[in-house]
Every structure is written in structure tokens, then in C-alpha cells.
Amino acid sequence: MNNSSWTILQMHEHQLLQSIYDSSTTLQGVSIGPGDDMGEVVIGNEKVLFAVDQLVVGRHVTPNTKPSHIGRKAVARCFSDIAAMCATPVGCLMTACVPGDATNEWCQEIFEGAKLVAQEWGGPLFGGDIAQSEGPAVFSISAIATPPENGAVLRSGAQEHDYLCVTGELGNANASHHLAFTPRIHEAQELLATLGSDLHSMIDISDGLGRDASHLANKGIKIIIDTTLLPLRAGATVESALSDGEDYELLFTSSTVPPTHLATVIGKVQIGNNTVVTQSGVDISNCGWNHA
């Protein structure tokens, strides 16, 4: 819900997470470690994906947001990570820390909103916890999913000459989209079925196109975004599309062009120095919203 444009992150969230990732030890049985949209562990002979995301009232939604919309968004944010791995939801848990003046009715509406969409999207809410806190209300969703047959699609697979593509529209998400979006779970699975092994990498856009594209621009590659090709939401500008975040569309690279009803080609992948630039050469790797 960022109203400024071309926001350059001063910290913090990305650097802090990277520091934690760098100091983490990958345990036996962890097949996808920190740094992707979900982690993966092997349980018995099965691979299972896990993600956790939190929503802070006053940070990710305004305090006067309709309670059912708060619950809906809490689930939608986390399930968008499932979509980014081309995975299938199994279920989810929800925890809440709420201030002492929160009413039972307010909390109940939030949980009902969360439960309704979790069931609708195939990952029913089956447990959780609640506690009182002195700070703002915080709701956390832990999601469980199963990967596709040939493995989850990661952030790290972009290759030279790939097309950079995006589902849906971008920008001006804070008008209403951030409360009403549906995670692109079905679109992700259709893209995988259509593109197969040509689908090389994927992420969901939560922090802004520039910032999130930078997570795909690794291993000595550069991503070039043609801003004239961006599919803009009503009322959006190029600047808001690049930096606002909260779009929760899928950004991916593929060696073949996806069907136009599923996605728009907005750029390309070249050999480079782990950056994201516009067609005119402006570095937008750090354009985005800081959730921390």
C-alpha cells in the first residue's frame, strides 16, 4: 500500500533476510532452502512445500479495512507464494496477535474471511492460535502445498535469451486490487502445463516489479524491462507499475512466448551483472516497497 513512486529501499527487509539466509545451515531433508517463495522438505518419500507470511494492520491494510477483507488478504498473500512455485495448496494455519480493545466480533469476521477463501482456493484453514499484544494486530498464515510432478519452479532458473513475462496488470494496486486479488494458482499451473520445461523461473510481485525482478536476475544475468510493454491497471503509471508492489501477479522467464491470454512479454534476459534495467538503461533493481 505504498503511495510514493520510484521508492528506493533504504534497508532493510531484503538485506536482513539475506543475512539470515547466509547464516542458516541447510538441514538434511530440506530440498529447497531459504531464499525462494516457499521452502521444501522431504517427509517420507514425499516433498512438501511450506510458506509463512504475516499481515500487520496499519502496515499492509488500514485499521478501518473491513475485517473480512483483512482475513482474505492475509491468506491471499501467502497463497500467492504457492502460485509462484506452480504448486498446489493443501492447507493452512493462522495465528493472530490482537490488541486488548479488539472485539470478538472483529476477530471472528477476520477468521471467517480467511477460512472462506482458503477453502475456495484449495488449502483449507485447519488450525491456529491467538494471543493478546500491546501493538497493532498481526495475522500470520502458514501454508502447506505440494510441488508439481517435475519439481517446483524456482526463482533461480532464468537463462540468457529468455522472455520476461507477467500475468495480469500492474500498478495502482493500492486503490482496491491489494484487497481483492486472487492468487494466480490456476494461471501458474496452466503456464506450467503449456510451457513445460521452457518455464525457467518465477516469482510473485509483492514488493514492486523492479525489486522482484532483481530476485530473478542472478547467476551473471541482466533483465531488461521495456516499460512501453507494461500492462497497466486503470489509473496506473509506469512508475507505479515498477515500484508500488502489492500486484501479486506472476513474473516469470521462459524460452518460449506464453499464450497472450495468460501473460504479457515485457522484457528479456541477457548476460550481465545481476541487475534489472529499463530499455533506456536505468537501473531499477532497487525500485520497490519495503515491507519491513
Image (cartoon, rainbow, N blue to C red):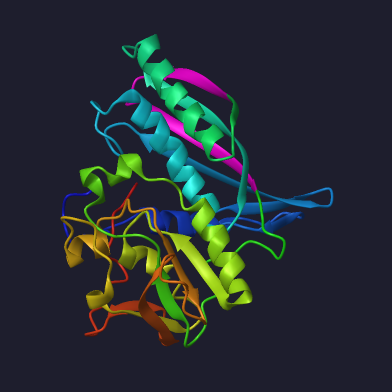
Give the vertical position of 4 relative to 251 (above or below).
above
Q: How many marks?
A: 0
Q: Residue at x 39, y 53 (%)?
A: 248
**Is residue 6 in sight in this rendering?**
no
Query: Residue 232 location, x and y as percent?
Result: 24, 63
| Image-quadrant location for residue 279 | bottom left
Residue range of the region highlighted in magenta in the rendering = 128-145
Judged left or right of residue 90, residue 288 is left
Q: Position of residue 222 (x, y in %)?
A: 40, 82
Nearest to the observer: residue 242 or residue 117: 117
Please check the rendered image and state whether residue 267 is part of the magenta-colored stretch, yes or no: no
Where residue 262 sits, quadrant-wise, is bottom left
Measured along the vertical axis of the image, is residue 139 above or below residue 5? above
Let me know if residue 132 is in the magenta part: yes
Residue 14 vs 162, above or below: the answer is: above
Residue at image coords 53%, 65% = 191
